[in-house]
Amino acid sequence: MKYTIAIPLLFITLLLSGCFYPNSQLSKNQVPNDVQLEMVQNAVDQYVERQQGLVPIKTKTNDTPIFEKYLLDFSLLKQEGIMQSVPGTAFENGGLYQYVLITPEDNPRVKLIDLRISAQLRTVKQRLNVYRSEHIYPPFGEEVAEGVFSIDTELLNLDEVPYIVSPFTQKNLPIVMDIDGNLYVDYSQDLYEALQKFEHDYKQGDDIRYILAENYPFVPAYSLPYTIKNNEPTFLKQEEK
């Protein structure tokens, strides 16, 4: 009987540890390390130098949120012969991450979007769309800030409060929505920790999300703007921009 139980447990342990996956698949699901990011950064730097300041990005509309706007176009790097292949961790190669640029006009730097976040938001959005097909207003919960609301999980028939695992701290972050029912990640916890941890000179009215993008490999994608008030993060109101 002991052997009968041990064999399935061993199988589950090996499966969760990835032992049954090929090495190529494992590499695609790992967070890109510093060497990979530096490799892509060097490729971008070479491209910018050759193209006299132009950056290798895909065309996006002007109203695209800032941290999702400058998606890296690996095809341009390959056309120039700067890169031979796309990193296995990149979405274009079946990976979990989109490579993006921040401050492309001044000092283009390579960062990452964790696409598991968008997948989780999409799951909640599907539930929300079903609800909106039968009701006028979104399933507003508590108003956490002016025009920003939590989600009423009962109205969406959710068994638990939906959350996102932070790429910065690995903590569970809430999902919030605006007056129109658009969903966002609430990075308040991560921002508070970053403000305490890293030196900065942010003042009220500044978009403090850059403190995360500057100090981590990731960008705070799918978020509303934040500013600082009384040394704490707060949602940035339209009139403060």
Image (cartoon, grey):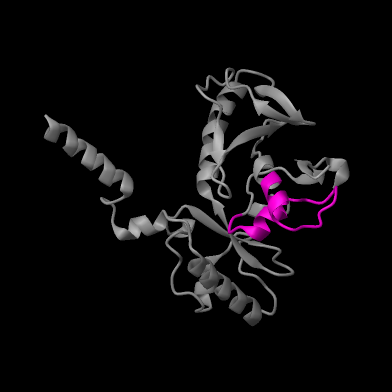
Q: Return the x and y of residue 95 as percentages of the image width and height.
A: 44, 55
| Residue located 70% across and 28% down the image | 149
The image quarter containing residue 229 is top right
Relative depth, front residue between 134 and 104: 104
Is 146 located above or below residue 152 in the figure? below
The residue most toward the right is 239
Q: Is residue 13 above or below residue 42?
A: above
**Magenta residues, as a range?**
192-218
Residue 32 on the magenta span: no
**34 and 113: which one is in front?**
34
Residue depicted at x 80% and y 42%: 236
Measuring from the top left, give residue 223's x and y in whole percent: 67, 44
Return the x and y of residue 150 as percentages of the image width and height.
67, 28
Please say whether residue 194 is one of the residues in the magenta stretch. Answer: yes
Q: Is residue 234 visible?
A: yes
Q: Quadrant of residue 133?
A: top right
Instruction: Quarter of the image for the N terminus: give it.
Output: top left
Where does the image place residue 232, in percent across and percent down from the top left? 77, 42
- At a point 52% along the width and 38% down the height, the residue shown is 120
Q: Is residue 208 above or below residue 145?
A: below
Query: How many discs mark residues in the rendered view?
Result: 0
Please say whether residue 66 is visible from this viewpoint.
no
Q: Is residue 130 left or right of residue 145?
A: left
